[in-house]
């Protein structure tokens, strides 16, 4: 039979005992937790892709893979090019063999598993190339799901992966609505485009931007009112991919069609 | 209450204590909430500098190439290929000319066909580029055997006005 005195004694020690580990795990002020995005940086990187200018040569993909040490023959890439061919009867064909690393050297559309689709020239109603890369979203879902704090957003808006901290659980790869993330075959961690963070911080342009002979890819700083790319984004008609996801992407497109997903 | 209830409890409390002390040593000091708040900015700060220190491989600065290869630079700049950066074909110039002393040039057919495969896409910039059918246009030989990539104009075939 337990007495009232004993019940109170055990309850108090029990609660105190439980409180010790909870309190010691992390002392976080609520201000910090709810502060959210107090962005004080005067740099916010943005990207502009002009699909009218892109010819699908894939020199961006080639340069990206070499610059960022992504195994060249592995079928993974930080940036890739998609080809869209829309026929007059409304069918949409899209492919991206090797992510467009070797360009598009065939008029046939690759359907996967060694099958190709031939499309007659007179059947094409429109066809174009769409380069894709990480959108460095303002609300990155990939960062929210990381259970260990290995992926994060810097003050200038770029989402990075800490290779020493990543445990390779691949939640972030699942969470990205754009399929921009992949598993690095050498480091065995999550990998993604980071706008060539090492280059943009040295005053260079990302490898893909410099490699593009047609200026289809451009980088700018939206916080700088004199930036020519920021001006285009603010004054011209641009669109982002999948706005309905609420991710607020920082990669803007000129000439995006409704078939592009 | 008897001690067989309390003893495992003490073990658990002890384990939690050990984990918390170990955590002090394992978790780096700069790991925590940074500029973008708890949801997007919970990370190890020094990783930013690790990424900034990642080696640059492509210079993508034709002026750098011009300093030594003036002739090649000038001919390229006068051609229709002036918009193509040297390193797109010659490879990343990190360390060149010391190491590597020679760059490996991509002279493959595929390199030319990236742009010059004829694709009849009326709404794309691709349609404005002169293209060939790679299966029919001399499929067995390399492009550079007839065309000089620095002087791609039709009038400047190799052996002609080089």
Image (tube, grey):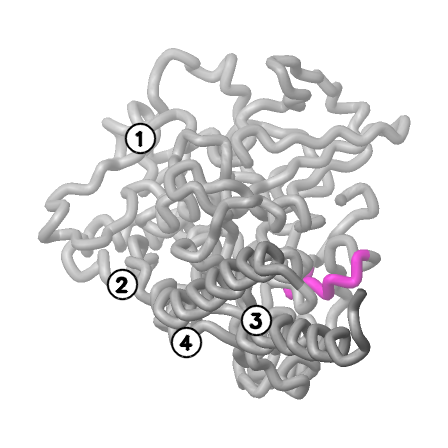
| Circle 1 residues within 10 Å: few <14, some 14–19, many ≥20 | some
Given residues A24 and B15, the one toward you in this image is: B15
Q: How many marks?
A: 4
Q: CA distance from mark 3 to mark 2?
A: 61 Å
Residue B133 magenta-highlighted: no
Please report, as a chain letter, where disc 2 is located: B
Q: Which residue is denoted by mark 4 in the rendering?
A: B30
| Quadrant including the N terminus of chain A | bottom right
Q: CA distance from mark 2 to mark 4?
A: 41 Å
Asked if labels 2 and 3 touch by Cβ distance under 8 angstroms, the answer is no
Q: CA distance from mark 1 to mark 4?
A: 48 Å
Query: Is residue A86 visible in the rendered structure shown here?
Result: yes
Q: Nearer the viewer, mark 2 or mark 4?
A: 4
Q: Which residue is denoted by mark 3 in the rendering?
A: A21
Give x and y (percent) for residue A131: 60, 47
Residue that appears at 14% across and 57% down: B68
Q: Which residue is denoted by mark 2 in the rendering?
A: B63
Query: Is the residue at mark 1 from the same chain as the one at mark 3?
Result: no
Q: Would residue B148 appear left or right of A254 to someone viewing this image?
A: left
Q: CA distance from mark 3 to mark 4?
A: 22 Å
Give x and y (percent) for residue A134: 59, 54
Q: Nearer the viewer, mark 1 or mark 4?
A: 4
At numbered mark 3, what does the secondary structure look like: helix, strand or loop? helix
Residue that appears at 12% across and 52% down: B97
Give x and y (percent) for residue B19: 45, 63
Asked if labels 4 and 3 touch by Cβ distance under 8 angstroms, the answer is no
Q: Which residue is denoted by mark 1 in the rendering?
A: B107
Up/down of B17 relative to A175, above or below: below
Q: Which residues are magenta?
A: A245-252
Query: Is residue A230 visible in the rendered structure shown here?
Result: no
Asked if labels 3 and 1 touch by Cβ distance under 8 angstroms, the answer is no
Q: Would residue B33 appear left or right of B58 to someone viewing this image?
A: right
């Amino acid at each position: 039979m337990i007495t009232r005195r004993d019940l109170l004694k055990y309850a108090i020690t029990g609660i105190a005992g439980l409180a010790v580990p909870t309190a010691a795990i992390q002392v976080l002020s609520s201000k910090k937790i709810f502060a959210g995005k107090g962005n004080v940086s005067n740099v916010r990187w943005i990207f502009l892709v002009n699909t009218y200018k892109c010819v699908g040569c894939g020199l961006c993909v080639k340069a990206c893979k070499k610059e960022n040490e992504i195994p060249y023959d592995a079928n993974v890439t930080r940036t890739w090019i998609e080809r869209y061919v829309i026929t007059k009867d409304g069918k949409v064909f899209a492919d991206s063999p090797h992510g467009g690393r070797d360009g598009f050297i065939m008029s046939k559309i690759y359907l996967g598993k060694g099958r190709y689709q031939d499309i007659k020239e007179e059947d094409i109603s429109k066809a174009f190339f769409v380069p894709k890369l990480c959108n460095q979203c303002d609300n990155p879902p990939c960062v929210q799901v990381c259970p260990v704090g290995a992926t994060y957003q810097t003050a200038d808006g770029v989402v990075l992966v800490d290779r020493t901290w990543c445990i390779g659980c691949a939640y972030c790869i699942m969470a990205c609505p754009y399929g921009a993330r992949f598993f690095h075959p050498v480091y065995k961690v999550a990998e993604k485009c980071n706008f060539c963070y090492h280059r943009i911080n040295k005053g260079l342009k990302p490898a893909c931007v410099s490699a593009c002979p047609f200026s289809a890819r451009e980088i700018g700083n939206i916080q700088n009112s004199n930036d020519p790319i920021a001006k285009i984004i603010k004054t011209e008609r641009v669109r982002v991919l999948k706005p309905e996801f609420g991710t607020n992407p920082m990669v803007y497109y000129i000439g995006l069609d409704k078939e592009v997903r | 209450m008897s001690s067989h209830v309390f003893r495992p409890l003490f073990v658990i409390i002890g384990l939690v204590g050990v984990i918390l002390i170990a955590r002090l040593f394992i978790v780096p000091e700069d790991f925590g909430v940074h500029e973008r708040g708890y949801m997007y900015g919970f990370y190890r700060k020094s990783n930013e500098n690790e990424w900034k220190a990642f080696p640059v491989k492509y210079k993508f600065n034709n002026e750098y190439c011009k300093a030594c290869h003036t002739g090649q630079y000038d001919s390229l700049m006068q051609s229709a290929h002036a918009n193509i950066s040297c390193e797109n074909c010659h490879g990343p110039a990190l360390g060149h000319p010391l190491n590597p002393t020679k760059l490996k040039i991509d002279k493959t057919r595929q390199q030319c066909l990236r742009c010059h495969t004829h694709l009849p896409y009326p709404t794309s910039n691709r349609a404005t580029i002169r293209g060939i059918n790679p299966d029919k246009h001399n499929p067995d030989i390399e492009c550079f055997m007839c065309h000089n990539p620095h002087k791609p104009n039709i009038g400047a075939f190799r052996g002609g006005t080089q």
